Amino acid sequence: MEGNATNDNDTTTACCTSSYTPTVIDNHNVKDKNLIQHVNQKAATTTLCDSFLSTENNNSSQHNDVLPSSSQIKLQNQTTNPLSATTKHHNNINPTIIPFLCGLTAGVAQAGFFNPYDRALYLSVKHKRPFLSTQNFKNPYIGFLQSITGRALSGGLFFPLETFFSEKFVLSSRSINSPREKMNDLQHFLAGSAAGAASALLLNPLSAMKYRTWGRDVNRGVIAEAVIMWRKGGSKPFFYGLLPTLTRDVAFGGTYTFLRRYVRKSDLLEEQYMWVGDTASAACAAIVSGPFNLARNVQYGTGASKQQPSIGKVLRSLAKEAVTKRSLVGAMLFLQRRLRIGWGTARVAAGMAFGQGVYDWCIVIVSRNN
């Protein structure tokens, strides 16, 4: 049977390759019946040949049409092998949440690394003793686990917010006809300011409870302190210090982001020394926002049932005290102490540079493996 099929195909192919044009024969005018029969057989063979070629062309066309592309093969593999598709889906992280996960990582790392410094700084202010006193560094991690969540958020929330607002400002300014360099500088300042404002709004209630807890001789815990604050003043105590916190964080965020981006854009430092630029940028931002931080601390220290002083009142009082000093040097030293320019500024600068480094490293690692 295989031999016969092959011969039939060969015959058909040979017939199709020969040139034959069927002739229309009028049966009434042709008397030779054999000739009529021969012509009719040729016509039938030609019809069969045309059908054969049409079928072959259609099969070839269909074969080319259904030839799968790489994306179709990938989709087919995922359809036939749902386990591989599910595995890949679980290995991927939503790009939207990557910056916030890295920000939380930076906040935890920063809180853990600088906890001895923070505790020593707090004890030096509370007990009015030198920062480097050995008593300030005893039991450096007491209470660390109880405050890790809030400190991780406060230390790491700024970085993803800065990334988020930077992308928004860049996208919104593509249609604005402005000098590119000036527009970039403005975008960076606005992005940092917006990140600072958002961080202040989200974290202010937690900061208010933390400061009340720190101001007591016996730590009642955050929840117990929140209940007491609510009973004495309702929701009002949770928003103490909100305006100076907003002002401080807007000034700090805008200054820090602007200076940090400017240093990187200007190629003032080599890549391995960029942390120096981040540290200097954070130090300048801390000094600029220092007066508002003082007003914030004063308002946080106000009792729940008392009227909190305004930012203007705190700053006017600060200026009056500085003027009463006998010399310019005395006034500068007074402002340096009141605004905590020194160990406090160094802590902010080092903490921001450290957190920025951890955040940038985390973004690179997660994005590479995602």
Image (cartoon, grey):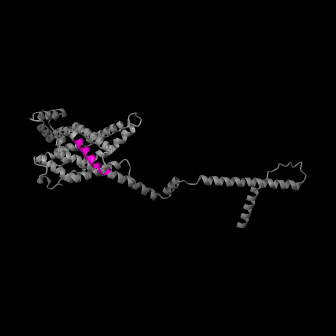
Q: Which residue is drawn at 90% across and 54% down?
A: 32
* Image-quadrant location for residue 284: top left
* Image-quadrant location for residue 294: top left
Q: Residue at x 54, y 53 (%)?
A: 69
- Residue 150 in view of the camera: no
What percent of the width, then of the height, locates residue 36?
86, 53
What percent of the width, then of the height, locates residue 99?
34, 48
Residue 21 part of the magenta segment: no
Q: Which residue is drawn at 73% across and 58% down?
A: 13
What percent of the width, then of the height, locates residue 64?
61, 53
In the shown orientation, is residue 330 left or right of residue 76?
left
Quarter of the image that includes the N terminus: bottom right
Q: In this view, does 247 lie above or below 64?
A: above
In the shown orientation, is residue 277 left or right of residue 366?
left
Task: Depth check: give the residue in front, 82 or 107.
Answer: 107
- Residue 121 in view of the camera: yes
Identify the residue at the far left of this view. 326
Task: Depth check: give the residue in front, 228 or 48.
Answer: 48
Quarter of the image that includes the C terminus: bottom left
Q: How many numbered tags mark residues here?
A: 0
Task: Depth check: give the residue in front, 105 or 301.
Answer: 105
Q: Main secondary structure of the magenta part?
A: helix
What segment is highlighted magenta in the picture?
A: 271-286
* Image-quadrant location for residue 145: bottom left
Identify the residue at the far right of this view. 31
What percent of the width, then of the height, locates residue 297?
17, 40
Residue 280 part of the magenta segment: yes
Q: In this view, does 320 lie above or below 24?
A: above
In the shown orientation, is residue 241 left or right of residue 189?
left
